[in-house]
Image: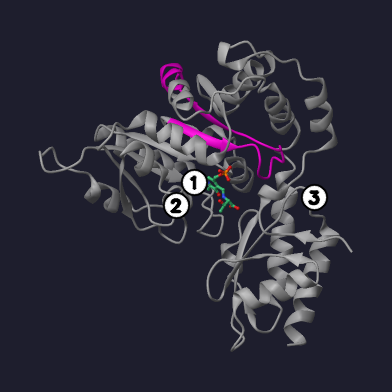
Amino acid sequence: METIDLRSDTVTLPSPQMREAIYHAELGDDVFGDDPTVNRFERMAAERVGKEAALLVVSGTMGNLVSILTHCGRGAEVILGDRCHTHIYEAGGISALGGIHPRTVPNQPDGTLRLEDIEAAIRPDNVHFPRTRLVCLENTHNRCDGAALTPEYTARVVELAHRRGFAVHLDGARLFNAAIALGIDVQELTRGVDSLSFCLSKGLAAPVGSVVCGSKSFIAEARRTRKVLGGGMRQAGIIAAAGIIALEQMIDRLREDHENAARLAQGIARIEGLSIDLARVQTDIIYFDVTAPGLKAEDLAQRLGARGVRVLATGPTRLRAVTHYGITSGDISRAVSTLADVMQSR
Ligand code: TLP
């Protein structure tokens, strides 16, 4: 019996077309700028999101770190959500490596930061304070039920930041999921932001890699920052080749992941002892709660795992499941019936 792995969309394996493209990739030394596949990929990525230039990096974490370090000098302050990935899951890299001061404001349930909260967090020019240099948004928002931020909201944050003299970075690890969920072109979600990163190794199913996009001058600086972090790669066309397939073939299919997530959520809603807010299910990420007395999320995850369905416990009663390339609609039916069985046979 095959395992149905719903822990994350990071577990996706490359498609046959990616393996083929990797095998045949034309390569060179990318630190010298000589890898034709990387150069082609970076041009494609920049064009796709409507920015001048792009930079291939190892991971989403490195994409955010490179971007934030490039925007901010040591001692600068970045405004970011208290539930955002950079603040919670990136090992404090911006402080550890960049001497950058994080100023958190509450993420609203829909993943946004209230404009009033951003405004109130901006530092006045005073020798006592760090300088506000950047605000970070996350779209889709991982910890906020995979919510998609709208172009209207993004534009309002961009307007505020630019009016007050600082930049906007968008952690778009799952940016294409947002565009698909909202039924819009991805460029509507990137307009005006000074930098963004998106991941190749989540729903887009490439084995490795993320990409930072921005103006030519920003990316030239980001290239230096990546080198400082030891992220200059040599025959990186091996990675970029899969990235090209990701951009060409894997974006539209994210729709299937959203449909599967919605079906999984509807199944969960019918199971006694579990609870889920169906109105919050928008993309490939769903969170649900155990309400059955005495059952911990961790225990449920373990029992499911023993039956071949893997999910993540993210709190004492909270669990996360993520659909992706490699999860079929048949897998969703099996996951729901396994969940129902496990809950019934307690
Ligand atoms: N998220 C992973 C874990 O780290 C939690 C996951 O399974 O969801 N931004 C966002 C919004 C992310 O969700 C992630 C990964 C990253 C950045 C970092 O990407 P990687 O894992 O490539 O460093």
Q: Is mark 2 within 8 Å of ligand 1?
A: yes
Q: Which residues are magenta?
A: 195-221
Which is more toward the observer, 236 or 333? 236
Q: Is residue 127 left or right of residue 90?
A: left
What secondary structure is found at the residue carrying circle 1? Answer: loop
In reply to whether residue 210 is colored magenta, the answer given is yes
Expressed as whole percent of the image width and height from the top left, the position of residue 253 reads 75, 43
Expressed as whole percent of the image width and height from the top left, the position of residue 88 reads 44, 54
The color scheme shown is: one colour
Query: Which quarter of the figure is the C terminus placed in?
Result: bottom right
Q: Is residue 85 left or right of residue 269?
A: left
- Mark 1 highlights which residue? 150
Q: Earlier in the sequence, mark 1 or mark 3?
A: 1
Residue at 51%, 41% in the rendered image: 61
Q: Residue 37 shows which numbered tag?
A: none
Residue 156 visible here? no
How packed mark 3 is, by other alpha carbons closer than 10 Å (few <14, some 14-19, many 20 or more), is some
Q: Of discs 1 and 2, which sits in the foreground?
A: 2
Furthest toward the front, the residue is 230
Query: Which quarter of the figure is the N terminus placed in?
Result: bottom right
Q: Earlier in the sequence, mark 1 or mark 2?
A: 2
- Mark 2 highlights which residue? 84
Expressed as whole percent of the image width and height from the top left, the position of residue 79 reads 32, 45
Residue at 82%, 20% in the rendered image: 24
- Mark 3 highlights which residue? 326
The amino acid type of the residue labelled 1 equals Thr
